[in-house]
Image (cartoon, rainbow, N blue to C red):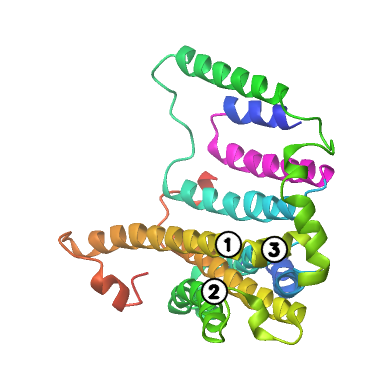
């Protein structure tokens, strides 16, 4: 795994900014295009790129499969939990006015943020988990065949 | 360019080139969405279509073979079906309102309502996000659940196969596949 020097250096430079961009898309989704789905995918791309260039083992050391599996479920839990919290606060399910009763539009902001976070976590988890599942199986093609 | 890429995908037998070309196809359609002012959709198409799915297709390719097998049956019937479907779709678009026309059903039904209510109720500049996460929160919850289910399905399928191959028995249920996190 000592070949592809340029690829490895460029990847090291890029992974950080990809993750930063994912967070930007995630938390800026209500002001600019993007949101949980896109941010989740971009976040997953950062880890997948790392996995492709440095090998699956390194990627799984950074982002262990058990964390990924928990994330898949955690995101849905965050989303549904937001609804349950608003329900417990005496409002309708997923009615974000509950989070700031005196300033409904702030409540909407918090609610959207929480929900988008849930979406992002699930999408990241699923994408990385699917990549791990594919990449973990022994490849039938050797490098030269490509 | 979209048509040219699609034709190239159909003609080529080398699956590596086909995977790359479908990435190109996604990127081109993302550009098309930008031209149509659907920036959110374009973003998703570029990230998912051109990014992730190309990687996943390449991953699948590494597990199978590189060259498509020549098909054994004649292409006449599929071609006929495609032409009939395509003609029906084009016939359907004849009834559609012109692009950007103000009295299109999509513009007159709920869209003005959302556009008018978003600034005062949600106060979020991106109306798409407001509709997606707030007005249509249930739908998005459903979508997230779909993503979740799909992910779990792929995990169970892929890791289950692997497990069987290692152990040599296949009368094993999914229960303990979840417990031992180190299947792969």
Please name the residue that numbered disc 1 is placed on. Answer: B140
Q: What element carries label 2?
A: loop
- Residue range (magenta): B12-36
Q: In this figure, which residue is indicated by the disc labeled 2?
A: A93
Q: Position of residue B6 (x, y in %)?
A: 65, 30
* Residue carrying label 3: A7
Dot 1 falls on a residue whose secondary structure is helix
Using the numbered discs, state the Cα–Cα distance from disc 3 to disc 1 in whole angstroms.
Answer: 37 Å
- How would you rate the neighbour count of disc 2 (Cα within 10 Å): few for under 14, some for 14-19, many for 20 or more? some
Q: Which chain carries label 3?
A: A
Tell me if residue A126 is in the magenta stretch. Answer: no
Seen at 49% across and 39% down, the residue is: B66
Mark found first going from the N terminus, 3 or 2? 3
Badges 2 and 1, same chain: no
**Location of the C terminus of chain B (image quadrant):** bottom left
Is residue A4 something that shows in the picture?
A: no
Quadrant position of residue B15: top right
Residue beneath the point at 25% across and 74% down: B176
Q: Which of A85 and B151 is in front in this view?
A: A85
Is residue B18 one of those drawn in magenta? yes
Q: Is residue B87 shown above or below B179?
A: above
Instruction: Please report, as a chain letter, where disc 2 is located.
Output: A
Q: How far, Cα to Cα, is label 2 from label 1?
A: 13 Å
Residue B45's place in the image compared with A70, above or below, is above
- Look at the numbered discs 3 and 2 and tell me whether their residues touch, using CB distance below 8 Å: no
- Circles 3 and 1, Cβ within 8 Å, touching? The answer is no
The residue shown at (71%, 76%) is A108
Residue A30 image-quadrant placement: bottom right
């Amino acid at each position: 795994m000592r070949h592809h020097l340029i690829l490895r250096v460029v990847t090291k430079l890029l992974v950080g900014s990809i993750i930063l961009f994912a967070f930007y898309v995630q938390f800026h989704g209500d002001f600019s295009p993007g949101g949980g789905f896109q941010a989740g995918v971009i976040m997953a791309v950062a880890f997948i790129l790392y996995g492709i260039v440095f090998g699956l083992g390194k990627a799984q050391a950074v982002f262990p499969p058990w964390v990924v599996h928990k994330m898949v479920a955690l995101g849905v839990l965050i989303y549904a939990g937001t609804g349950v919290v608003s329900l417990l606060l005496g409002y309708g399910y997923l009615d974000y006015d509950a989070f700031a009763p005196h300033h409904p539009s702030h409540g909407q902001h918090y609610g959207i943020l929480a929900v988008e976070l849930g979406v992002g976590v699930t999408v990241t988890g699923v994408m990385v988990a699917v990549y791990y599942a594919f990449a973990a199986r022994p490849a039938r093609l050797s490098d030269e065949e490509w | 360019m979209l048509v040219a890429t699609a034709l190239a995908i159909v003609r080529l037998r080398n699956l590596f080139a086909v995977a790359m070309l479908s990435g190109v196809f996604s990127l081109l359609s993302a550009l098309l969405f930008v031209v149509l002012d659907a920036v959110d959709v374009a973003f998703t198409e570029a990230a998912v279509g051109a990014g992730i799915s190309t990687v996943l297709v390449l991953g699948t390719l590494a597990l199978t073979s590189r060259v498509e097998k020549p098909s054994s049956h004649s292409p006449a019937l599929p071609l006929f079906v495609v032409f009939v479907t395509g003609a029906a779709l084009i016939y359907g678009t004849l009834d559609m309102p012109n692009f950007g026309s103000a009295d299109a059903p999509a513009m007159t039904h709920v869209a003005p309502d959302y556009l008018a209510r978003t600034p005062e109720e949600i106060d979020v500049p991106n109306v798409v996000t407001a509709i997606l996460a707030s007005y249509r929160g249930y739908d998005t919850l459903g979508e997230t659940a779909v993503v979740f289910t799909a992910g779990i399905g792929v995990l169970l399928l892929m890791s289950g196969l692997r497990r069987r191959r290692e152990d040599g028995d296949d009368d094993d249920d999914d229960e303990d596949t979840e417990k031992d996190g180190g299947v792969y």
